[in-house]
Amino acid sequence: MKELTEKQEKFIVKWKERRKKKFLYIIQNIYWGIPLGIVIYFSLNHFKLGDFDLIRFLIAFTFFVINGLYHGQKQYNLLEKAYLKTVDNEDVLSGIRILEAGKVWNYENLIITKEDNETLIVKNKLFWLDDSNALSENLDECLNIVMKDFERLKMNSDFDVFSSEFKVRIQVYNNSEKVNPLIEMSI
C-alpha cells in the first residue's frame, strides 16, 4: 500500500478550504480572460486607438469573460475530481488497515469484516426490506446493489490487491437485524 506523498497532503489541505468557495474560484478565472480579451482586441486593430469600435470590443471582451468562466469551471471540476479520488484512496487505505487489524470497516453502504484469514464478509449497511417485503426479486435486487458497491470499491487498486487474497461472501440483511442473512452469495 502506498501512503500519501507530501504534495498530495498539501493539495488536500489547500483544496479542502478552497473547494468551499466554488463560485469565487470560478470567478477568479475571469481575471485572465479580461486582459487577454483587451490585448487581442487591440492587437487585431494593430494598437490603433482611432480604429476603436465599441461593439467589437464588447464582443471580444464578453467572449473572453465567458471563456474564463468556462475555463474556471473546468479547472474546478478537475481539481475536485483529483481531491475526491485522493481522499477516497486515503479512506480505502485506512479501511485496509482496519481489516488487517481484525476490526469492522464501514465504507459507504458496506460493512466489511475479515471472518478469518481466508474470507471477507461484505454486508449491507442500509436495510431495504421488511420481513413482509422479502420477495425473491427484491432480494436479488438488494444483492446486486451490494455487489455493485463492492465492485466499485475493488476499482481501487490497493483494495483489489488486498481483497484478491480472500474469498468473499456477500450478505443482505433486513430491518430486524437478525443474525441470519436473507440472502448470501460467495464470489
Image (cartoon, rainbow, N blue to C red):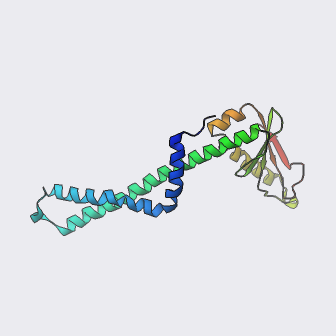
Q: Position of residue 92 (x, y in %)?
A: 66, 43
> In the drawing, does residue 46 fall left or right of residue 64?
left
Please tell me whether residue 35 is drawn above or below residue 150 in the rendered image.
below
> In the drawing, does residue 143 fall left or right of residue 89?
right
> In the drawing, does residue 175 fall left or right of residue 14?
right
Q: Position of residue 130 (x, y in %)?
A: 85, 60
Q: How many marks?
A: 0
Residue at the extreme bottom: 54
Instruction: Please state, as top left, top right, bottom left or bottom right, where the C terminus lies in the image.
Output: top right
Residue 176 is drawn in which quadrant?
bottom right
Please tell me whether residue 57 is drawn above or below residue 167 in the rendered image.
below
**Residue at x 65%, y 46% (from the top left corner):** 91
**Residue at x 84%, y 58% (from the top left corner):** 175
Instruction: Please state, as top left, top right, bottom left or bottom right, where the N terminus lies in the image.
Output: top right
Residue 52 is drawn in which quadrant?
bottom left
Q: Position of residue 126 (x, y in %)?
A: 76, 56
Which one is nearer the viewer's eye here, 179 or 137? 179
Q: Position of residue 173 (x, y in %)?
A: 83, 52
**Residue at x 11%, y 60% (from the top left corner):** 48
Residue at the extreme right: 179
Residue 25 is drawn in which quadrant?
bottom left
**Residue at x 81%, y 46% (from the top left corner):** 171
